[in-house]
Amino acid sequence: MLTWFLNPWMLLGGLAIFSPILIHLLNKRRFKIVEWAAMEFLFEADKQNRRRVQIENFLLLLLRCLAMILLALMLARPLLPSSVTAVLQQSQKVERVILIDDSLSQRVMVDSQTSLDVAKDSVKQLVTQLANSTDTEDWLTVMLTSDTAHFLIDNQPLTPNTVSGHLQTISDINCSDQAADYPEALAGMKSHLSGDQNYGRVAYLFSDLRKRDWLVGDAGQDAAAVTDSAAPNRVVESFSQDLLGTYIIDTSGPNDQNLAITSIRADGLLVANKVINFIVEVANFGDQTVGELQVLLQVGESQPQYKTVSSLAPQEKKDLVYTWVFNAAQKERGLLDFEQEKTNIRDYRITAQIDRQSLSGEGLKSDQLSEDSSRLLSASVIDGIPVMLVDGDPSATSERSETHYLRSLEVLGTGLTMTTATVSDLETASLSDFEVIFLCNVDEVSADRTVALKQWVAGGGSLVLMPGNRVRATTFNDTFYREGNGLSPVKLNSIAGDPTMAQWTNFEVAPQVHPALQVMMDSDASSIGNVDVFSWWTSEFGENVDMQSVEIPLRLTDSDNSIAMLDRRLEDGRVIVFTIPGDGDWSMWPSSPTFAPVMVDLISYLVGSKNAESSIALGGSVKVPVDLSAFENRVTVRDPENEKMETVAKPLNPEKPQSVLYQAVFENLGKRGFYDIQLKRHSGETQNLLVATNYDPRESQLQRLSESVLDKQFFGDKAALATTAELLGQTVDGGNSELWLTILILLMIVLGAEQFLGWFWGRKR
């Protein structure tokens, strides 16, 4: 019953019907009766008119009560089926809810127009006709697949006076460049359609009917029906049950052939003075073989490199490999110098692109969407992987230094840049300037710096502990082990072995070969097992250590099978613990031919390939780590159109605001191109970070739903495929209409009658 009203709670206003009755009763008790003999003659005369007056007062009371009821009904906005209200010549109220696909694939040409232009023209024709129609009272809601949370037009009246503004809003729609998320978009449409509105609704979906949008699972297979209730077509079927009509309008044509660059990535770290392989993936999403296709790669403003694909079969993808060497800047490095820039990172804008000029006239038909024929990559190239070597036992004689053998790794081709520091230097160094830190024969660091080291590791840094003879077990455990809650997952017990070097043990590689040992094991599996170790630290795990985060790549062949090397994952970073030092006092390893390649591979493993790819899908977000010990907390970004945005970095862990590791987040990067992120050092220098945004490669799949799928009740019984011409000729019936105008007219008549009769009868009295 209450569903017949838009504002049923306003019916409570009908209680005002008692107000005229109450006033009438109070008026009757207003006078005190006093007996007076002279009035008897007047009472006798009044008896003849009393019945007439009572009838007149009763009629006035009824009119006033009726006015209260009509006022409450008008505020409650009652609705009746259009079949009933048609007798009253009342227009049927209908909300027209339109969802337009504005994704990248809508740029495909249909004759001389894009699919999106076809959709906009159809919508404008429909809106114009509805605005000039007298059959229904229409209201307009327009939504885009790129953002169903915010309506382009939100249930606005559609009349000859408002239609020009609506048409301009529709004309201003542009492709969002992002992939359409039909499950999310249709869920948003369903949420709106299921809202508490009692007049009729008609839904319109303007779509290019791509498989990848409508079919769940393998979009490459035609399915007679998709049974998953969350599948887009089943969502349409579910909300169409309660609507006056649901129409799906095809905005595209048969052009579904497409070529695309689907990815571009660097094979390994982007380090200067090393040969870098850039791998470009090109795909043919059509059903015709394409031959002699040229693809170019351009680094910055340099001359592009070309590769030719002799043949690319339907639905085939191929990788093209381009080589490049980035030259390092000439800069002296050595001892930690706080006056010089700690890192030398240069950003390069890299573009991979299909050379459309290499396609003939017919060949161009195989690439209907030109926008995805190029892809961007931001390459942050470092002159060397910045490594800090903290020497806990420095020596005037280089060969006796704890870091001697590690420093020798800085040669052309390794991509390493070694910076040697003392323990006191470590206390003030900017940790974020380094990818890897070695603590060689170090057992003690200040409490504050230990906390900073742990935060740095958790944020993605890599720490290598190599204790030697200067290390005191108790001090080391208090600093780095901390009852299993510190950086080291093991505590040191005592030094074992034979210091006279008369007896020795060897390394034993774990069956699951660690990445740092893989190359060495593949080239000479026995060499590392022949290394002699004379002394080592015995160690044991604590009860609080998560063993699932620990791997033991190397053990010793002593009777206890002691740990030689362990690898611990700590949030986003890693801690490597050796039980032997990096000098040659306890083993023959540093002077053996296996040490250098294992350490180089270890550093490469620790750093990983996080600098190799810096590409974000359109609409995504970027998270920028900010070390407050080196940088200010305000971060600036300039988008591809050079518009400026700013944000303030926030603690990585809100429960630990004293942390120096913060993070700045920029969300919804909706423009395709390069974003220049700027961090400002406390010294005033600016450090830049380049990020590229690219089209979602899923939008490159232009295959459309087949007729066999669409002919088998793909959208259910209540939804129908329609052309623009069919939309313009359709009518709706079965909805509800509001009666507020009729009620308002009746209210005015009742109030007018009450006023006139009250005046007329009062004058006679």
Image (tube, grey):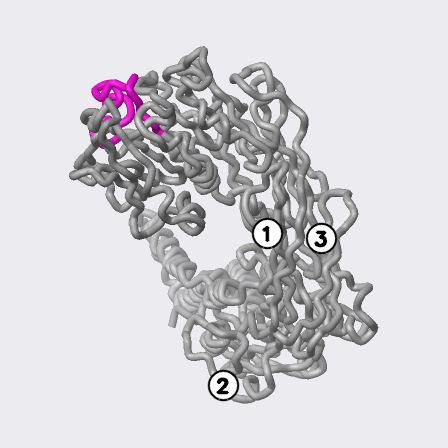
Label 1 packing within 10 angstroms: few (<14), some (14-19), many (20+): some
Give the amino acid at mark 3. Answer: Leu
In reply to whether residue 478 is colored magenta, the answer given is yes
Could you tell me which secondary element the residue under label 2 belongs to? loop
Residue placed most toward the observer, 200 or 673: 673
Q: Pointer 2: what residue?
A: 224
Could you tell me which secondary element the residue under label 1 belongs to? strand
The residue shown at (54%, 81%) is 719
The residue shown at (49%, 34%) is 625
Residue 758 x/y as whole percent: 52, 60
- Quadrant where the N terminus sits is bottom left
Compute the Cα span from label 1 to label 2: 38 Å
In reply to whether residue 378 is colored magenta, the answer given is no
Picture disc at residue 265: 1
Q: Which residues are magenta?
A: 465-485
Give the amino acid at mark 2. Answer: Ala
Residue 268 x/y as whole percent: 54, 46
Picture disc at residue 297: 3
Compute the Cα span from label 2 to label 3: 43 Å
